[in-house]
Amino acid sequence: MEIIKMAGLCVLCLLPVVLLRKTTPEQAMLLTIAVLLVALVQCVRAAVPLLEEIEELFARAGIETFYMPVLLRTVGAALVSRVCADLCKDGGSQSLASAVEIAGAVAAALISLPLLEAVINLLLGYFT
């Protein structure tokens, strides 16, 4: 149900954004950012049960809870870079959008290094 509300909000704000973009692109960008912030808050609220379920799965599987924040930070970096890249595209700068996407990929790789290290250590434990 939350996705319908969020989609409705975005569609309702689309017309004013399109109209504002012709006359005052700065205000169109500010309205877009405001709607994105509202959508982000709704996404975080909707994600709470999902996070609780993932935490329960980690506990049942015997995986250390240390890896949960790593997973969440990696997903967060991907989402932030995607939204920022889309804003850059809306602002007319494809090259800035590409730079943000590259930075997001590098950030996700750096954040997920502890997971990669754990997998390698697990594999090395089986073979030694």
Image (spheres, rainbow, N blue to C red):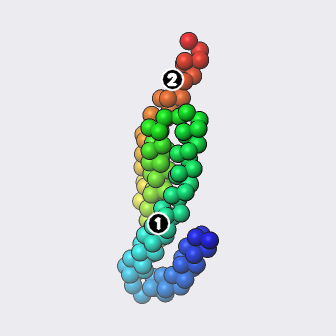
Q: Residue at x 48, y 43 (%)?
A: 68
In the image, taking residue 125 as reference, residue 88 lies left or right, namely: left
Disc nearer the start of the sequence (2/1) = 1
Q: Residue at x 56, y 45 (%)?
A: 56
Q: Choose between 43 and 49: the one closer to the eye.
A: 49
Q: Is residue 78 visible?
A: yes
For residue 2, which quarter of the picture?
bottom right
Q: Give the amino acid at mark 1.
A: Leu
Residue 126 lies, in percent from the top left, at 59, 17
Task: Say whether marks 2 and 1 touch (CB < 8 Å).
Answer: no
Residue 3 lies, in percent from the top left, at 60, 69
Q: Choose between 66 and 98: the one closer to the eye.
A: 66
Q: Secondary structure at mark 2?
A: helix
For residue 31, which quarter of the picture?
bottom left
Q: Give above or below for 85 relative to 26.
A: above
Instruction: Quadrant for the C terminus, please.
Output: top right
Q: Give the amino acid at mark 2.
A: Asn
Q: Which residue is mark 2?
A: 121
Q: Choose between 23 and 51: the one closer to the eye.
A: 51
Q: Which residue is mark 1?
A: 40
Q: Residue at x 55, y 57 (%)?
A: 49
In the image, taking residue 109 as reference, residue 1 lies left or right, namely: right
Residue 101 lies, in percent from the top left, at 47, 53
Q: Secondary structure at mark 1?
A: helix
As measured in the structure, the alpha-carbon distance from the residue carrying label 2 to the one carrying label 1 is 36 Å
Residue 35 lies, in percent from the top left, at 46, 75
